[in-house]
Amino acid sequence: MNRRQKHGRGRAAQRSGVLRRLSGLLIVAAAVCALIFFVLPNPLHVDPEWKGADKPIFVKGQYTGFSASGTGENLLLPLPLLEKSVDSSIRYESGTKSVILSTDSKLLYMQADKTTASLNNKPIQLRLAPEERDGVTYLPAEPLKSLYGLDVQENADTGAVLLMTAGETVPLGEVKEDKVALRTEATIHAPALADMTPGTKVRIWSRHGEWLYAQMNNGLAGYVQAADITETGVKTVEKTATEPTRAERSWDGKAVSLTWEAVYDRSPNPGSIGKLNGVNVVSPTWFKIVDSEGNVRSQANQAYVKWAHGKGMEVWGLLSNDFDPDLTTQALATYEKRMRTIVQMLEYCDLYNLDGINIDFENVYTKDGDNVTQFMRELKPMAQAKNLILSIDVTPKSNSEMWSLFLDRRSLGALADFMIVMAYDEHWASSPEAGSVASLSWSRNSVERILEEDAVPAKKLVLGVPLYTRIWTEKMAGGKTEVSSKAVSMDAVADIIRSKKLAPVLSKDTGQNYVEYKEEGVLRKIWIEDKVSLQSRVKLAKSLNLGGIAAWNRSFAGDGTWETLSGIHQ
């Protein structure tokens, strides 16, 4: 073997040794890393996502992505945060840069850059005006605390704002004897956000096995082992005490038996009405919005109110939108116009000593549904302040653009003392086929859908029943059957049956008596409203524990109507 070969072999051995040593070092390094990251607690510290944010706001221990402005009595909270975390129904109207906030008993109106505001339509002076900056409206925190019962805590070190809502609770705790890490995940191998010294106070927002998701007063929130925390109690944000509404005081456990009084040219003479056995509410159609500014026209009659009260009946004046969709669009478009309607209605209630208001808005564009709900939201605290019952009439749910889809029954059910389901016109005046005005199965389905889909409490829901029926006419023309109808009273149908000596038969499909006969070469069909149909509706209302019965309308009633409907009280 020559010298060159020996030298090459030596270098190869040397390289092999170096590689073995490097490999060993790598193994040792990997072992150390494994020890650090998979056995020992992670020593790394990281900054929270909100580092650098000015006045970051937290809800339930989570950074909201929003920031407050100012501090102390000058603290302002951003409207988008309030809409998301406090009250989704806050209304902002860009035309006047106004914000409308409401509870069951309070209605607060504010405008950007103005310290003049109103509470329940009475002027108040704000210490701090709302502001608009970069397209965001900021509201003063102090009146919000009073309105919603908010708990707002600021931290001087980080500027963090911790927000809790009325009724919210969170367990409290503090760090035990040793310093512990607040980590980004529920594992000791996750980086730390902070080292918490003994005695550090935290809010415990959730539990994850042996770990807690906790938040320090400076806003930092993360995971800490439950064994390192002593629980010290519970923080509860008390709800603002509220007085029971008159509906709760006067109608709890008592069924509503209402009849509408249809008033067209003039109010009826009370002396000609007779006895309304079991009826405890009359609702005359006295009021309607008559122009785009929200003005209300009245046909109220003091003698009628005096008569009703003398008979032990409450009077809930009905306010309609005159079934005019374009008028409704304009009259409900702004706070100023809605408030004009509300103020005038309340003045009429005072003037005529009314006991309640029944809202009947029909034939409304779907796009205006939010304005209908907002009208009720603004009317609710104003009516409650005057001890008035507030009810609203709704149609059964359907795909009808103008008669059903605009109604947010879930929200309306929360706002109104009573929601009356107008369970009639299953087959309407111009229906392409003849049929019942309100078959029993359809009436049941109309109510049950609202109970189940919109979570309206049964005690708030009142079943509307028809006291009219339709005489349907079917005749052949051009090889096709033409259908028409006319609405008549219960007595008119009874007269037809008597004069023509007809024998009604029970229709199992509708739960009603039915007759048909030929007259003047055409076929007449009548699904009859009588004691049988009314008894079945009373039974339905009671079986579903509804708040009562409402009948449209008094002038259509026949013999025995009120005695039959009075069964709702038994």
Image (spheres, grey):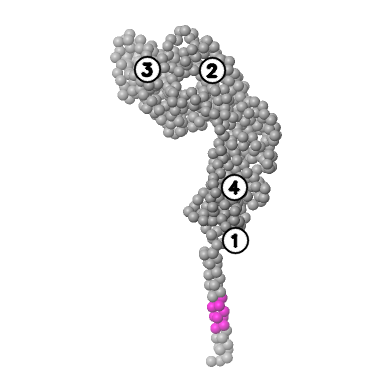
Front residue of 81/297: it is: 81
Say which residue label 3 marks. 564
Identify residue type, mark 4: Tyr
| Span colored in magenta | 12-22
First along the sequence among labels 1 and 3 = 1
Q: Earlier in the sequence, mark 2 or mark 3?
A: 2
Residue wearing tag 4: 63
Q: Earlier in the sequence, mark 1 or mark 4?
A: 1
Is 301 part of what is drawn in magenta? no
Pick the residue in front: 10 or 124. 124
Q: Give the CA distance from mark 4 to mark 2.
A: 50 Å
Magenta stretch mostly in which secondary structure?
Answer: helix
- Residue 498, disc: none
101 or 164, which lies in front?
A: 164
Q: For residue 18: magenta?
A: yes
Q: CA distance from mark 1 to mark 2?
A: 71 Å
Cβ atoms at labels 4 and 2 below 8 Å apart:
no
Q: Secondary structure at mark 2?
A: loop
Q: Residue at label 1?
A: 44
